[in-house]
Amino acid sequence: MASITYKGFVIESTSRPRGTPPSWTLEVQITPADRRTGTRRCRASNTYATEEESAPRCLAFGRRIVDGELHPRPKGRRRS
């Protein structure tokens, strides 16, 4: 798993294999760099053939969230 510090946040790829054959998910954990609380876990429906392919895309996804370009829904909420 890869991680970066970006604009005061630690963005960590939390991609994992899913299905058979496995494809890797697009998931990140975003935590303020100065603390361990307030962690956001975000994911999208995209999948990739390998972990190596998913990691940079996860980090780019996290940067877009920090920049305010993406607004993922909190886990468990559904659109009506």
Image: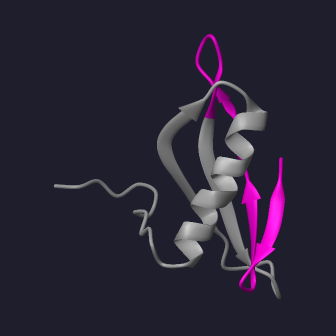
- Which range is magenta? 1-24
Which quarter of the figure has residue 70? bottom left
> Image point 45% across, 72% down: which residue?
69
Left or right relative to 16: residue 2: right
> Image point 29% across, 53% down: which residue?
78
> Image point 68% across, 40% down: which residue?
54
Left or right relative to 58: residue 77: left
Instruction: Point out residue 38 in the picture as x, y percentages from the top left corner.
Output: 66, 79
Q: How many marks?
A: 0
Q: Is residue 39 above or below residue 32?
A: above
Instruction: Point out residue 27 in the picture as x, y percentages from the top left corner.
Output: 62, 49
Residue furthest to the left: 80
Q: Is residue 37 above or below residue 1?
A: below
Left or right relative to 67: residue 38: right
> Image point 78% across, 36% down: which residue?
52
Q: Which corner quadrant holds the C terminus?
A: bottom left
Which quarter of the figure has residue 25? top right
- The magenta stretch spans residue 23: yes
